[in-house]
Amino acid sequence: MLTRTEFFRGLGDSRSPRSATVLELLFDIVYVFALARLAGRVADDLTIVRHTLLSEAGQTILFFTAMWMIWSLNALLASTYDPRRPDLQAVLLATMFGTLVLAVTLPQAFGQRGVVFACTYVVIQVGRPLFLSFALRGHAGRAFALRVLTWHLASSVLWISGGISGGLGRGVFWTLALAIELIGAATTYPLPRVGRRQLTSSGVSVSQEHLAERYNQFFMIALAEVVLEAGAAVSFPGFTTEGTIALVASFVTVVSFWRIYFYHVGSGHAPTPSGEGIQLSRWASYSLLLIVGGIICTAVGFGQVIEDPHPPIDWALVAIIFGGPVLFLIGRSVLEKENRSAPRCRALYVGAVALVVAAPPMVLLPPVAVAAVAAGILGAITVYDQRAHKRGSQTNPTL
């Protein structure tokens, strides 16, 4: 609860608490639904005619990245200012409702609901910095809010144009709009005659502990998608031999993802299950984008194998089953800041290369064997990563 002094303090003078609030956990409930919708789109992409696969997959990637932009900026907002404030809670709840609308419109966003999707997305992305620009009047952080607002106003024209145009034009406009937002976020939203300024030089102080905990929570939500997909797929036909093998493989994969995410120490920082040992890099947001994307692909891949374990296997399904862990390992390898004084662990890079090399021959094996091989490789990577840490701890006490 806020004290009387904290309640009447301006937004710019508030500071985010070290731990995430209950409202932020409530916000993530919407993303459970959104991730399930995205997983459904990935599954549909695997069953459509092959000559339209790339275009359909491109649409799914676009939606996933757009939804991710909303979540990441929301996490940054709550990690900068106090999310217990009533005005900020109102913004978070409005964003939560808008995200729910986006998740509902996903199946027909490139169809009849394109205008609804575009308008809702623009209201969310423009509304938050617009609120901050008013709430931070007289505070140094207002300049950064205005820069974010300017970039999103520029992209909003393309979002609305795409929603109105439809067809191929919609994909082009929306891709350009999303590219503008990604470039803006990567360059901290520079403006002419203002240039590029870091958050700290703009009067904005981000609580790294709060942000790291939000990343941990979202990772666990994404990880649950593997359990949901595998469990739902195996529950319909019951426990068959093939389904049981695939279910065990999916469980091994979940444990490996969890172990690598929380206990990988390639950066030299002490690992803790609470995430306090995770010191986020500058590219942490994009790293988690890869991590969550990899988890969704893995969930869909194992779910497909459980539903149809009989050969032959399709090359696209092999790419999903092996590509998901590769994305996860790449994302996790650059999530944290590099500690130059500590030895660098290359276990995750070695694992990604091993998965890529092992993938092509998998088209000759039954689907269940492919899932088992992928899980086995990921499990071996986990063991190798932990042993590398143990050896590094013996030679470097700082690990």
Image (tube, helix red, strand yellow):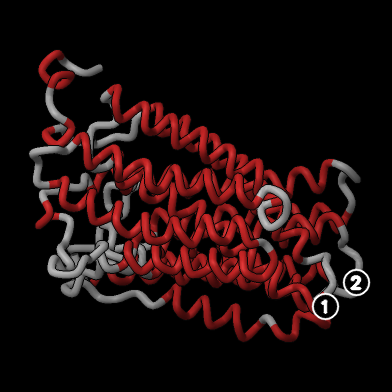
Position of residue 237 relative to residue 357, above or below, is above
Q: Which residue is mark 1?
A: 365
Q: Are marks 1 and 2 in contact (CB under 8 Å)?
A: yes
- For badge 1, the amino acid type reads Leu
283 over 220 or under it: above or below = below
Q: Please name the residue that numbered disc 2 is placed on.
A: 311
User: From what the image shows, is residue 128 above or below residue 291?
Assistant: above
Residue 391 found in image quarter: bottom left
**Residue 331 in the image: above or below residue 137:** below
Left or right of residue 322: residue 89: left
- Quadrant location of the N terminus in the rendered image: top left
Q: Residues within 10 Å of mark 2 (few under 14, many from 20)?
A: some
Q: Amino acid at mark 2?
A: Pro
Q: x and y percent of residue 167 in the render?
A: 69, 66
Residue 313's tag is: none
Q: Earlier in the sequence, mark 1 or mark 2?
A: 2
Residue at position x 51%, y 38% in the image: 98
Q: Observer-nearest residue: 79 or 86?
A: 86
* C-alpha separation, residue under disc 1 versus residue under disc 2: 8 Å
Residue 349 location, quadrant? bottom left
Q: Position of residue 7 (x, y in %)?
A: 18, 19
In this orientation, does residue 200 appear? yes
In the image, 165 versus 351, the foreground residue is 165
- In the image, is 119 to the left or to the right of 360? left
